[in-house]
Amino acid sequence: MNNFDFQNPTKIIFGKDEISKLSKEIPANAKVLLLYGGGSIKKNGIYEQVTTALSNFEVLEFGGIPANPEYAVLMEALKVIKEENITFLLAVGGGSVIDGTKFLSSAALYSGLDPWNILVNNERTFKGMPFGTVLTLPATGSEMNSGAVITRAETKEKFAMGGPGLFPKFSILDPQVVKSIPKRQISNGLADAFTHVMEQYMTYSVDAKLQDRFAESIMQTLVEIAPTMLKDEFDYNASSNFMWSCTMALNGLIQKGVPSDWAIHMIGHELTALYGIDHARTLAIITESHYTVNLEDKKEKLAQYAERVWNVTEGTLHEKALAGIEKTTQFFHSLGIDTKLSDYTKDYKGTAEIISKRFEERGWKGIGEKGKVTPTIVEKIVAMSY
Ligand code: NZQ
Ligand code: ZN
C-alpha cells in the first residue's frame, strides 16, 4: 500500500427528515445565501423544508445555477455575495449547485486579479467562505469532497478546481429527496458513482486489500440496487444505499494508499464541454475504449473486478479482463445509457483530434495512473468511442 494522509472534515447528517436540523449547523449570526438550480426544489417540497428550518436566519436566495454550473451565472452570484456581505453559503441541489457553490466559496475570498484563474490555472483553495449543503441528487460525491468542475459556455471549456479549503462544513443527506428525481438522473447517478470507484480501482495492484474491497463493495451495492432504483415506486432503503454509496465513492477514502486514474473523467469532461452531454453519459462513452486500449496495464485489476464484482469464474486472466469490460458496458446499457458518441451527436467526426489537441496545448502530456496516456493515445480512445 502507498503512504497517505487522510483528513475529511465534512460532517454528514444522514437520514429521514434530517433537513430540519439545518439551523443547528449554521453560525447563529450568519448572513446566508441559499443557492439552488433550475427550480426542482420548489416543486418537491425541499425548498419549504429548508426555508422553514432557516426561519430565524437572514437569508438571501440565488436560483438558476444550471446543470454543468456555468461561470457567467456564478459571476452574477458572486456580485450578490459581495454587495450583500454574505458570510455563509448554502447549496441546495445536486453536484452542479454544490460545485458552483464551491467556486463561489473560493472566489468570494480570492485575492488574485480574476477568479477565472482559479479554474484555468487550477489554483488550489486553502481558505474559502464557509458553506454547507443539502444534497438533492446522489451522484457526484461533491457533498463530501473538496473538488468542483465548472463550465464556461463562451469558450466551451470545463475545468476542475479544488483544495483543502473547499470541503463543505456539513452535508444533509435525506434519502427521501430521491423520490422526485427523474429516472434519467438516477441512471446518471448510478453510472457516475460506479465510474468514480472504477477510476480509483482499475489501475495496478499495490496489495491494498482493504481499499480494493471497499471499492468492490461499493460497486456491488450499486449493481444490486440499480434495478430497484429504476422502478417507478420509491424505495427508501434502496435510496439510502444509493445515496451513501455515491458519497463513499468519492469522499477520498477509497483512493487513499492506491494509484488512481481519472483519464475517463478528463476525457469525458471534454465531451460535456463540446456537446453538452450529461456528465455520467460521457463516462459511459469513454470507459470501454479506455480499458480496451490500456488493457495490458490494467489486466490484473480488470480480471479481479470481473471475478469479485461480476462473479466471472471461467477463463484465463486475459479473458476475465475482457469479460470485466463487457460486463461494465452491459451494466451501462441496463441503466438505459448509450455507450457510443454517435448515439448522442451526429457531429462526432474530428472529436478525437480536437480533444487530443486540447490536451497537448494544456500540457497534459500523459494522464492515467502511470502518466502513460499521451494525447495520441487519448485520440485513439476517443476515436474508438465513436
Ligand atoms: O436544477 P434543478 O431544477 O434542481 O434540476 C436538477 C438538474 O436538472 C435535477 N435535480 C436535482 N435534484 C433533484 C432534481 N430533480 C428532481 N428532484 C430532485 N431531488 O437534476 C438535474 C441534474 O442535476 P446536476 O446537479 O447537474 O447533476 P449531478 O449531481 O449529476 O451533477 C453533475 C455535475 O457535477 C460534476 C459534473 O461534471 C457536472 O457538472 N461533477 C462533480 C464532481 C465533484 N465535485 O466531485 C465529480 C463528478 O465526477 C462530476 O464531474
Ligand atoms: Zn463523475
Image: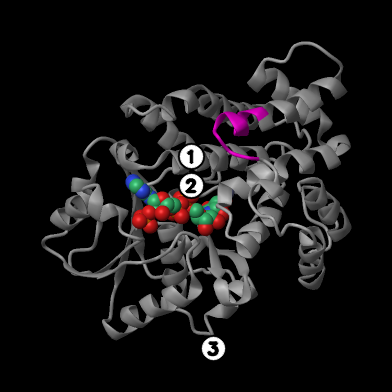
Query: In front here: 274 or 192?
Result: 274
Residue type at mark 2 is Gly
Q: Secondary structure at mark 2?
A: loop
Q: What is the secondary structure assignment of the residue under circle 1?
A: helix
How dense is the environment of label 3, judged by Cα within 10 Å: few (below 14), some, or many (20 and up)? few
Which residues, given as a range, are shown in magenta? 330-338
- Disc with the residue nearer the chain's start (2 vs 3): 3
Mark 1: amino acid: Cys
Residue 141: mark:
2
Residue at 80% over, 58% down: 352
Q: Is residue 147 left or right of residue 233?
A: right
Q: Quadrant of residue 254?
A: top right
Marks 2 and 1, how far apart at CA? 6 Å
Q: Earlier in the sequence, mark 2 or mark 1?
A: 2
**Cβ atoms under marks 2 and 1 closer than 8 Å:** yes
Pick the residue in front: 2 or 183. 183
Q: Are marks 2 and 3 in contact (CB under 8 Å)?
A: no
- Residue position for label 3: 113
Mark 1 vs mark 3: which is more N-terminal? Answer: 3
Determine the residue located farthest toward the left in the rendered image.
56
SS at circle 3:
loop
Give the Cα separation between the discs numbered 2 and 3.
30 Å
Where on the picture, by quarter, is residue 38?
bottom left
Label 1 vs label 3, nearer the camera: 1
Residue assigned mark 1: 246
State yes or no: residue 331 in magenta.
yes
